[in-house]
Image (cartoon, coloured by chain):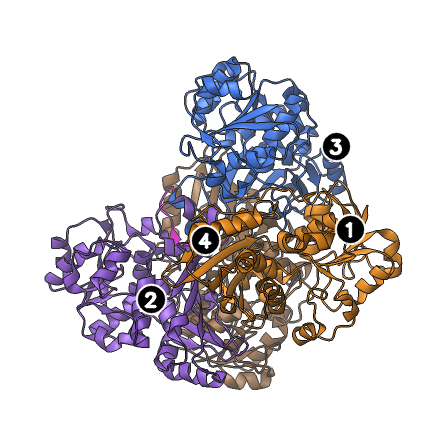
Chain colours: A brown, B blue, C purple, D orange
Amino acid sequence: MKVGIIGASGYTGAELTRILSRHSEVELTVVTSRQYAGKPLSEVYPHLGGISELFCENVDTDELVQRADLFFTAVPHQTAMEIVPQLLDAGKKVVDLSADFRIRRADVYEKWYQIHTAPHLLEEAVYGLPELYRDKVKGARLVANPGCYPTSVILALAPLLRQGVIDPTTIIIDSKSGTSGAGRGAAVGSLFCEVADGFRAYKVGEHRHTPEIEQELSGLAGKDLTVSFTPHLLPMSRGILSTVYAQLDKPVRPEDVYDVYRDAYQDEPFVRVCNPGVFPATQYVRGSNFCDVSFKVDTRTGRIVVVSVIDNLVKGAAGQAVQNMNLLCGFEETMGLLGVPVFP
Amino acid sequence: MKVGIIGASGYTGAELTRILSRHSEVELTVVTSRQYAGKPLSEVYPHLGGISELFCENVDTDELVQRADLFFTAVPHQTAMEIVPQLLDAGKKVVDLSADFRIRRADVYEKWYQIHTAPHLLEEAVYGLPELYRDKVKGARLVANPGCYPTSVILALAPLLRQGVIDPTTIIIDSKSGTSGAGRGAAVGSLFCEVADGFRAYKVGEHRHTPEIEQELSGLAGKDLTVSFTPHLLPMSRGILSTVYAQLDKPVRPEDVYDVYRDAYQDEPFVRVCNPGVFPATQYVRGSNFCDVSFKVDTRTGRIVVVSVIDNLVKGAAGQAVQNMNLLCGFEETMGLLGVPVFP
Amino acid sequence: MKVGIIGASGYTGAELTRILSRHSEVELTVVTSRQYAGKPLSEVYPHLGGISELFCENVDTDELVQRADLFFTAVPHQTAMEIVPQLLDAGKKVVDLSADFRIRRADVYEKWYQIHTAPHLLEEAVYGLPELYRDKVKGARLVANPGCYPTSVILALAPLLRQGVIDPTTIIIDSKSGTSGAGRGAAVGSLFCEVADGFRAYKVGEHRHTPEIEQELSGLAGKDLTVSFTPHLLPMSRGILSTVYAQLDKPVRPEDVYDVYRDAYQDEPFVRVCNPGVFPATQYVRGSNFCDVSFKVDTRTGRIVVVSVIDNLVKGAAGQAVQNMNLLCGFEETMGLLGVPVFP
Amino acid sequence: MKVGIIGASGYTGAELTRILSRHSEVELTVVTSRQYAGKPLSEVYPHLGGISELFCENVDTDELVQRADLFFTAVPHQTAMEIVPQLLDAGKKVVDLSADFRIRRADVYEKWYQIHTAPHLLEEAVYGLPELYRDKVKGARLVANPGCYPTSVILALAPLLRQGVIDPTTIIIDSKSGTSGAGRGAAVGSLFCEVADGFRAYKVGEHRHTPEIEQELSGLAGKDLTVSFTPHLLPMSRGILSTVYAQLDKPVRPEDVYDVYRDAYQDEPFVRVCNPGVFPATQYVRGSNFCDVSFKVDTRTGRIVVVSVIDNLVKGAAGQAVQNMNLLCGFEETMGLLGVPVFP
């Protein structure tokens, strides 16, 4: 099957290329980039030397749709909502990595982002978290690939919310992300000297992943929720760790909570529940599609603390997008995604 | 005045030496280290070459007390409680950087640490957070220098608790520390390859700084509190950032909260309240005795989020210890501590 | 085919496990570690959770040889020379990652290391740099896997020495390595705080990889050489970059030197010659078996500067070992080694 | 005395502000920045909060000269040569941190940079390396502050060249710099994700510090030299380490070379010669004005290897500029520069 990447010059586009280059069922036929049009992708990303022979192109959608059957749109929000309808109209499948089709309600989207110009697609778009929506993804035309923070948070909380272990009105999410989440744009705030050997919070209480998190957690809880969400910037390239706090609904035994997680994830190929008492670390999922999760029942405070980690560029973006493609196309779900974490 | 450092070979001891070497009123006359006895300190810490001519010594307390008037004890807890009484009995002043005299109630100490062999000193020891206990420190014989995490947390919350802005039963503390907090001991978990490019939580709900935090926050709130406290390990050497969450007691305007902080800290030489909307970062206090603090009133959730940063080796340890020494000895409080943060 | 790793708890052992776990022709059946005997490998290395179910074992060679057909010995030098003869006597194939069988002359080995107790194997052992000795490796019983620094240096210089482009008596090698090269032993010098945000030279003119480099360069030059070799420690986990200087034998055109490299390496699956004017970087080979190489003809000084990069744990250790195993066993040379570099 | 910084928004400008804020004899009265005009410097550099109350200004030279007696010009080359003559004409003293007045011969400057529009000042300008030109600096109007790489290299080699220990035609310089040397400009190549966990050479054989190094080494050797110079980019913010190779002129004993260095530097306040066998590391000079230097006599190859380290922003830029100001103004040479290295 022929696939294309629209917006290939960002870190997510490069990561998609890395993964797809070793996928046995698809051929990457076209990668677009306005900024680098005409350049070999392996010049823009030297690590892809000898891996990909493709050149960055700047072509319009009419031509694009001749070149592949499925597209990954790795462009900024607002740009995605212009391109995706054209791709669908041409009969193509789309895995969209922007935020444009993740929020089901246009009014909510518009409150956090801006006007939505393709609201008719919101109902059709499937939120591409396979652990929650595997069956829906299989039949979809348009998959909205989840945000990186929401992936780490939803996988951390889904089992607890489904089983009613926690009071959903008390959820506090403290997340920390590597710098690749800020993209490859040349900004002073992303310079090595500004980020290295330092740590900060940003967009406290205002990050745009908040409504996405609330939408999915509300669905799991069966009622509308608001959550506190604070993202932080880590002095490293890859990895997200979310520490999530909630009041326990009633006293629970840790071993019962462990069973809740194990039951939820034992058949999931990409979620690893840590042994009791062991907590995950981002370096143990680096470069892989794994989400590792663990928890602590704190009887002193009546709270539970859940910790989850992902590689933000893999399970938090490109890897999950390929997982969705696999489901959508009927390939083995893990195809191309069995790379072992790279540690140290 | 002559001062000595007991346990000089750890990072805190080295940082004390760095600061004291430029202090105009004291002379560092003796540094002890069992492990490095007989070696020049500048061999153990090459950055001190040309700064300190001292040799590490392994001498008993009897001799030690001949050599200085005030001692910094930078030894592990349990060791401190053996040495400190002897120093006091010999008429010396002590700033203790261990945990042994921070907890006022022996039973609480013993629950989190082990048997306390000098409980008679607990009442006398002054908790050396100058912003809270400046006057008491001035007259003290024994100052218990606060822990690094507690310093960042208490300075973040003190104004809110004093003014009754928050519901003190809802406090959740998510802290992140640089690796120097783990000390210079040769442990696999502290190796570069284990820490770099990674992030993890540790001792979730079980860290020994918890009772220290609870003691001080309880005092400020006027009632006994338990808090959730989760420490994390950052891939950098210096710096602590604490993100603190609490339910607002009633709706407040951000500008009023800003006034609460400004009023609390405007005369403090080492606390900088960030301008509204600006959040602190650890790299902006690196190498300095500053604590920077800011907050976000989140009307969506009815919570406040406070963020504070310190350099764990300075305001979180050696710098605060010198600040306490200055108070205790009647020197200018800021003497030796005016080093500007080193950025980038 | 069944394979075993002797000494699996170091970073090289973990990297071998990572690579072998995705190799379609071999099964890893036994991993040994004295220190961690009885523990699951995935507890020693949590990134291998869900990848390997093996437990670390401490078994003697008699039992070991029942468990696999080929062994990777990833133990320190001196230990290897005790084990390897037993494995060979039992009819096993061995890829040895220590230094014990790399130096052909026992007297040279003994000058830089210590007494050699299995000198009879030195002639038989094949130096496992496939780009130089592919055919010999194919028929070998015992492959001495090259050192990390030597791999980067020899691949940088081999084409120039073979074509007589440089004066081989003038070679100066300035190498820089990530910290994983120092291993997972708990040493103060390898602590995060000692290495991060810093850079140093070490073992200047005395590093044990010197005779290995000289042996191979001498062979290529056709005469005995001595070289200057200075290793440095980089504040990062993976990667070696070697900057190599030599006097040009006579004036050459850069394009002719480019042809020399291209001719040497165009059929090599793991050596990428950079386009003229482009220099390599360690981050572009991270996690992969590639060696990237480039050069500058400096007419001002009459010298050539060659720069090469590898991942020290892959092409510099575990990856090359698997490449050797593939050759030795008649598998496709690239099998299990097609992982794309992980960037950023 | 009143001083100003022209071009205060770069890392060098910020570092000048840091150092000058604690200098007891000068007052920083004006800082200019076109980009940030109107903003508080402490907003551009939050670490300066509470340290400097100055606002960035964009004023013409006519007004500037009313505001201070001495200026640091921390602007790009080519810009400096426009401003400096005006400052001098107004009777001001200048320490120029650009490259514009470092090269004595206009033709050499123009070969590596571009047309020089103030060549009449080249003879007057004093090359501000106090260890070589202390007396000349004392009487100067215009000091050309040395480049960062040249400072590390010249201090490494000066004693050897003066005493004729090495063959000056064989000098090879392999330098490695932290990323702050690339400045605060928003460039993709300086992003955290591009630099972290990686290492590369750049401008191989073409870096503009080459003629500056050659000019000074030629002066010391007493004849015209060319050198090989390769800069590299380290994944850290501050620090330069230069590894320098040269053929020994004749066999020497290490202890005699040690004496050469000790004799040269024992009265220098900012050069520390390491004990024999000990090599320097950048982390031990971080934040300080020290240059640490050591060497290895390699009898096997007949070469000497010298290693020197500095903090590129201090001894390599702002610190040395203040050292020059002190000399030029008759202050104690070390004033404001006694900050102890910050480690870890």
Looking at the picture, how far across and down is residue B84, in whole percent?
A: 49, 20
Q: Label 4 to label 1, Cα distance in Å?
A: 38 Å
Give amino acid for label 3. Answer: Asp
* Mark 4 lies on residue: A282
Q: Against C223, is D196 above or below?
A: above
Q: Residue at x 65, y 20 (%)?
A: B136
- Could you tell whether C197 is left or right of D141 in the image? left
Nearer the observer: mark 2 or 1; the answer is 2
Tell me how far mark 3 sits from mark 1, CA to CA: 21 Å
Q: Which residue is mark 3?
A: B267
Query: Do residues under tags 4 and 3 come within 8 Å of each other at their CB atoms?
Result: no
Disc 1 marks which residue?
D40
In the structure shown, which secondary structural element does the residue marked by tag 1 occupy?
A: loop
The residues tagged by marks 2 and 1 sit, at their Cα atoms, a distance apart of 56 Å
Do badges 4 and 1 share one subunit? Answer: no
Magenta residue span: A272-285
Q: Nearer the viewer, residue C341 or D236?
A: D236
User: Which structural element holds mark 4?
Assistant: helix
Which amino acid does the dot numbered 1 rest on? Pro
